[in-house]
Image (cartoon, helix red, strand yellow):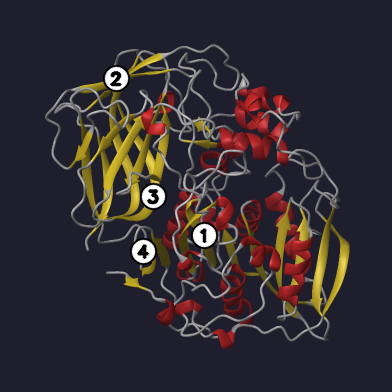
Amino acid sequence: MKGSVLTVGAILGGVLTMPLLPTITEAQGQNPTAPLPTSPNWDIAKLSQPVFKVRTLFNVPVRMRDGVNLSVDLYIPDAPGRYPTLIWRTPYSNNSPGEVEQGRWYASRGYAVVKADVRGKYDSEGEPYTYKYEADDGYDTDEWIGKQPWSNGRIGLMGGSYLGYTEITQAIRGSKYLAAMSASVTTSDIYNNWAYVDGAFFYGFAFPWGGTSMDGHVGQNRNPEDWPKAYWNLPILTSDSAASHVNRPYRDWLRHPLRTDPYWNDISFEDRVHDIGIPYLTVDGWYDLFMRGAIADHVKIKANGRTEAARKGKRLILGPWSHETGVRFVNQPSAADRGIDFGPDAQLNPQLIYLRFQDHYLKGIDNGVDKDPPVTIFVMGENKWRHEQEWPLARTQYTPYYIQSGGRANSSAGDGTLGTALPSGAAADTFTYDPANPVPTAGGNTCCSSVPGGPFDQRKVEERQDVLVYTTPVLTQAIEVTGPIRMKLYAATSGRDTDWTAKLVDVHPDGYAQNIQDGIIRARYNGAIGKSATLLDPGKVYEYTIDMWATSNVFLPGHRIRLEVSSSNFPRFDRNLNTGEDPATGTRMETARQTVYHSTQYPSHVILPIIPR
């Protein structure tokens, strides 16, 4: 079924004038009149209105099953009655100005609001340990809410990022009081999205966020004076110490590199996300670090959710955002090297999107939420929203684009080409990967560190001799790439272990090389991600499948499609030292001679999900 392109008029038929939170709108440059990706049946007048005065109760203790008291702040309509409840569970303080403002905003619209500090954080008792207690504590808090005199027994889960993860764990536990959930930029898959990515440690996120900012009872400094020194520390097991912290969860993630280790069973819920039994709205971004997991969660729930309500009520919105901008649904910065201006439609109002969803399921308001298409995507390049009926799109034509060269694809000045014809030139390209001089991260799906996420000009990266660059001729017609991307790579290395990376790039007519999506695979885990490790036979040709995640981008006429192949993306991912030692404790580095094949026998290629136009 062909998707329908949405315009401002078709979506809203009017202008949003409702009050918004300063902390997530004006202060962030968000446009409060931006369009929302909803059905044409959207009716703003059906949103809950701010008609209630609000009474507030701070630091209310809620006892968990083991006797630990967690602290919650309550915002309740100041009028007799019982109300549906919205709950946020946060490790970042439930009493910040933004949290208070948000609590009052929803309470004035007829919701009881619960803002909870998770265990061990701020006003809550207990041991702080990232992820560990969220499922049980969330369930216990839901059960407590359902029995309160101000509760009508219907709970909606709210939040994004870590707060979204707490939602997922609560929903999987499945208190009888839960009615709906809405979350942004999050996923259930802690192992292969928060800590690791296809064998490589998610260093540029798990270290600065998990190893420093999540350390201790209150918010911790995650900006040491010398971040480069901390990032380059070896072994990476002690990088937290180089950043003036000693964080037990961070070190535990590194000590348990395989998903088969029982350590992950009660914190990584990707195998149980289908147990969610309530309607769930997910909002994520093409440049968000959790995007791959968010899509996987959606597909699993849509197909196998525990209840019909969960399957029919699953919704997914994917915009052109990184993690930082996706929390607020705002546009990317427009600096020459960092951002791409995706236009005014890229800026959305999260308060109203979530309010509409919860209004329907918690208050029973007939506002069209149940009739919205399952998937709404922002198509970059054309910068338009579009509704779809499924993911991946049923009309996708998976098309191989083969890499070729005359044997010198090194850098953008080389002779690498990309096209649909089978290889016919030189058999291979070579480069030297030196872990002491890795390819630097330049944007992409990362977050929460000194490394910027989102779109970024790749031209400096493409000047390097250890980056193989393959480019199509200038396009004469638009090519839409929407869906999951994979690379089939045939390669050999002189090392006992190494990494392989692949990056899809949109080259603009002025030369700006916009990263679209990328992926990595750690060679020792080839074919057995999370299950087992096998060191390589140096010089042997192996076949690798690199998951390059997903996107929606139109490569416009005058643009070119480009593929980069290399062996590092640092510090987004930890450096493979090529020795085969334990990545967590290894300190000895070796250079590796890398060979990427593109012959008739070994036709390396990227598989692009082409959408007919």
Q: Nearer the viewer, residue 69 or 424?
A: 424
- Give the Cα separation between the discs numbered 2 and 4: 40 Å
Q: Report if the CB atoms under discs 1 and 4 are less than 8 Å apart.
A: no
Q: Is residue 494 visible?
A: yes
Q: Report if the CB atoms under discs 3 and 4 are less than 8 Å apart.
A: no
- Taking the spot 14% from the left edge, 28% from the top edge, the residue there is 600
The numbered dot on residue 390 is 4
Determine whether, in the image, residue 611 is placed left or right of residue 209: left
**Mark 3 or 2: the one toward you:** 2
Q: Nearer the viewer, residue 305 or 320?
A: 320
Picture coordinates of residue 545 (x, y %)?
Answer: 33, 35
- Give the Cα separation between the discs numbered 1 and 4: 25 Å
- Taking the spot 68% from the left edge, 28% from the top edge, the residue there is 226
Labels 2 and 4: the sequence-earlier one: 4
Quadrant of image for the C terminus: bottom left
Q: Which residue is mark 1?
A: 331
Determine whether, in the image, residue 83 is placed left or right of residue 358: right
Labels 3 and 2: the sequence-earlier one: 2
Whether residue 234 is situated above or below residue 33 in the rendered picture: above
Mark 3 residue element: strand
Q: Residue furthest left?
A: 424
Q: Which residue is mark 2?
A: 430
- Taking the spot 55% from the left edge, 18% from the top edge, the residue there is 582
Crowding at mark 2 (Cα within 10 Å: few <14, some 14-19, many 20+)? many
Determine whether, in the image, residue 494 is placed left or right of residue 31: left
Q: Which residue is mark 3?
A: 550
